Image: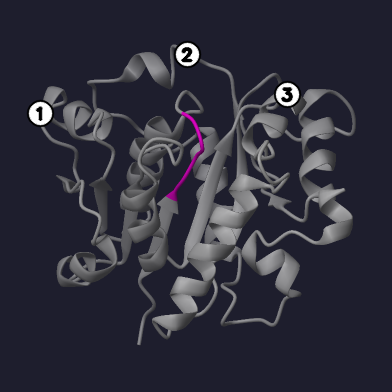
Amino acid sequence: MTRIHRWALISVKPGVGRSTSGIFLGQALYERDLSPLLVDADKGQTCHRWDELAGGMPYPVVSKTSRSLDKTLPDLEDGRGAVLIDTPQIEDHAAIARGAMIYADRWIMPLAPSVVEVDRMFADDNDNGKDVLGDFLEDAQELRERAGRPRADVVVLLTRTNTKKATKNGPDADVREALAGRGYETLTAQVPHNDNLYRQSGGSRVRAMGTAYERVLKELLARPYTDEVQLPRQQNAGAHTDEAAR
């Protein structure tokens, strides 16, 4: 049986290129004949409005801002090779994001290449000193396990970078190192800063071929899910070790 790719784009805060990534990854999946469905679960409805202004994408975009996405999305899978979810920012709509994450077998975290942004993502709770995002991801992993699902694959996608390719030094290299220190993997493919091509194309049909998202999709499709290969628990889950948290 052919596997359905179930992916959730997640972020703590807005402004990281999550919805833009949703539109372009949806298009990249379509161009690979994978029959995607893009679910706009963000109350801001960027993807849904983009679809309307463009007169419809060549693949379906549906609005579904529900807290029970893990229960309702399986009903929309018929005939689909991929279901991609643009989730709302976790800091404001954790319940909706959690439902999407229980459903999705892969969590993709778009992030601008700034060590400050990494610190913001993993900011400690001043009351108990805990890594709030790490705890949230681990709680979602445990809910997946209780539902009989394997632990989700977690990977970071760098967006708005200064270069087209990963470098050995500079902001993106610093961020990759900082994320690795916390136990998170980062895709080699990254999305360079190009407002004319990406953000300002909002409301128009797009083409993924020849863009960074074509490379991003190629890497994602080649990447195994956690039930296909045994990885250390740290890498599988966005779980954080005491050593990494110090």
The percent coordinates of residue 74 (x first, y second) are 22, 71
Image side of residue 14 versus residue 47, left or right: right
Q: Which mark, residue 24?
A: none
> How far separated are the C-alphas under marks 1 and 3?
38 Å
> How far separated are the C-alphas under marks 1 and 2?
21 Å
Magenta residue span: 9-13
Residue type, label 1: Gly
Q: Which dot, 3 or 2, sits closer to the camera? A: 3
Image side of residue 209 versus residue 61, left or right: right
| Dot 1 crowding, Cα within 10 Å, few <14, some 14–19, many 20+ | few
Q: Residue furthest front?
A: 127
Where, quadrant-wise, is the N terminus in this rendering? bottom left
Q: How is the rendered protein coloured?
A: one colour
Residue lying at 22% horizontally and 65% vertically, measured from the top left: 73
The percent coordinates of residue 23 (x first, y second) are 33, 37
For the residues bearing labels 1 and 3, Cβ distance under 8 angstroms: no
| Dot 3 crowding, Cα within 10 Å, few <14, some 14–19, many 20+ | few
Q: Which mark, residue 55?
A: 1
Looking at marks 1 and 3 on the same chain, the residue that comes earlier in the sequence is marked by 1
- Residue 149 appears in the picture as rendered: no
Q: Nearer the viewer, residue 117 or 190?
A: 117
Q: Nearer the viewer, residue 16 or 225?
A: 16
Residue lying at 47% horizontally and 45% vertically, measured from the top left: 10
Q: Main secondary structure of the magenta part?
A: loop
Task: Indicate the secondary structure of the residue bearing disc 3.
Answer: helix
> Pointer 2: what residue?
195
Residue type, label 3: Val
| Dot 2 crowding, Cα within 10 Å, few <14, some 14–19, many 20+ | few
Task: Tell me which corner region of the image, top left, top right, bottom left or bottom right, holds residue 102.
Answer: bottom left
Task: Indicate the secondary structure of the residue bearing disc 2.
Answer: loop
Q: Against 92, is 68 above or below?
A: below
Q: Which mark, residue 116?
A: 3
